[in-house]
Amino acid sequence: MNDKEKLFVEKLIDASLRHYTGAEPRSGLEDRVLAGVRARQKAARRRKAWAWAMGVAAVAAMLTLLVIQWQHQQPAPSPVTAKASANLSAPALARIAPPVPPPMPHRPRRPAAPSRVDTRPQQFPTPRPLSEQEKLLVVYAQLLKNSSGAAVPKADQVPERDLEIPPISIAAIKIEPLAPPENIGDEK
Amino acid sequence: MVAIGQVILSQALLSADAKDREFEAAVREHARYVYRVAQAVLRNHHDAEDAVQETFLRFLGQQRNWSGIRNPRAWLAKTAWRVALDRRRQAAAVSLEEAAGVVENLRAAGASAEDIAAHAQMLALVERLITSLPRDLRDPLTLSTVEELTSAEIGEVLGIPEGSVRERVSRARKMLCEKLAGLMEKDRER
């Protein structure tokens, strides 16, 4: 290759390298880049906010579950612990006291249900009106009373008398002697 | 207390607004330069624009360290270079012999070196020849095609001394010339 050829190739390479990145970007490149970057930034922020919200919600749900579980497992204070807590000072109690659950939303109170009235009768059995037979019996007793004065003595007015029990005679038991076993051997 | 809070909030908003304006100014000042760096590697408008966007997104991510970036221009070039390398695709397969034949025909027709260089076939041929160079020569040569980049900045991007950049670019050009001359000679022999 002669010098002329070499020179041409060198010129060609230089010119080609100048053209290599000479292409100009389309107009409005800066605006497109700014818009694209801001849109991607906004999307990233939204994703971040979502992740935070989900995290907070998960933590809140776990805390609620823990509080509910703790409330269910809380045993009734024994007299000993009640006495011990009574002896503790207020700061000490605050240290060991479990976190107070958030106050429940206010609800209007329902009117108190009327207390049960004890409708049971004072007397047992319950007095009832007399039946027809009882009424007839009462009339008969009145009539009998009127006719014979003290015809029907009251149970508590019956005079007490000594009960006479005749002596009991029981015959003596006689036991006959058993016959000697004479014929036992003969039978054999 | 409320007043202090308002002052802090307003200062934070002002600071955010100032940073936003600073970012916009940086985009307007350096977008084309960053584009050329990306374009030198990617050789495609769409890919180059995507790389520019990615580069500025990374720049925005470094917002807190902006004061620590000594040379934003070099920082942007370095980031764009890395982003573009990550996105680089295989160069289009071009028949070297065919491309050399087109160049020879153009030359025979009396076209100047400048005219031939503007031809699409010639650009494809140069791209293919650059791709065939060893990496330590290819990278400085590719970056040297971006007019705005100085040897010092190329050195900063590649992490090599400025003198090495000059020496490698020179060697790369020489190698390109030899390869092209060889192709053209082969074509003439045929």
Image (cartoon, coloured by chain):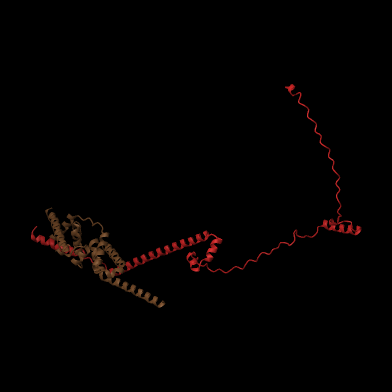
Q: Residue furthest left?
A: A2
The residue closer to the viewer here, B91 or A40, is: A40
Q: Nearer the viewer, residue A179 or B159?
A: A179
Instruction: Kindly indicate which chain is depicted in red in the rendered structure.
Output: A
* Residue most extreme to the right: A147
The picture quadrant where one finds residue B35 is bottom left
Query: Against A124, is A173 above or below?
Result: above
**Can the viewer see residue B111?**
no
Q: Work out whether residue A49 or residue B94 is closer to the camera in this orientation and state it.
A: A49
Question: Who is closer to the viewer here, A162 or B162?
Answer: A162
Which quadrant does the N terminus of chain A fall into? bottom left
Q: Residue A117: where, in percent of width, then height?
A: 68, 64
Is residue B68 visible to the viewer in this orientation of the structure?
yes
Q: How many numbered callouts?
A: 0
Left or right placement of residue B10 versus residue A91 in this view: left
Q: Position of residue A173 (x, y in %)?
A: 81, 36
The residue under the point 48% across, 66% down is: A92
**Measured from the top left, where is residue A128 in percent x and y?**
78, 60
Please state, as top left, top right, bottom left or bottom right, where the C terminus of chain A lies in the image: top right
Relative placement, left or right, of B38 versus A134 is left
Task: Look at the image and give the colour of chain B.
Answer: brown
Q: Position of residue B179 (x, y in %)?
A: 15, 57
Q: Which residue: 25% across, 66% down?
A: B75
Q: Quadrant of residue A187?
A: top right
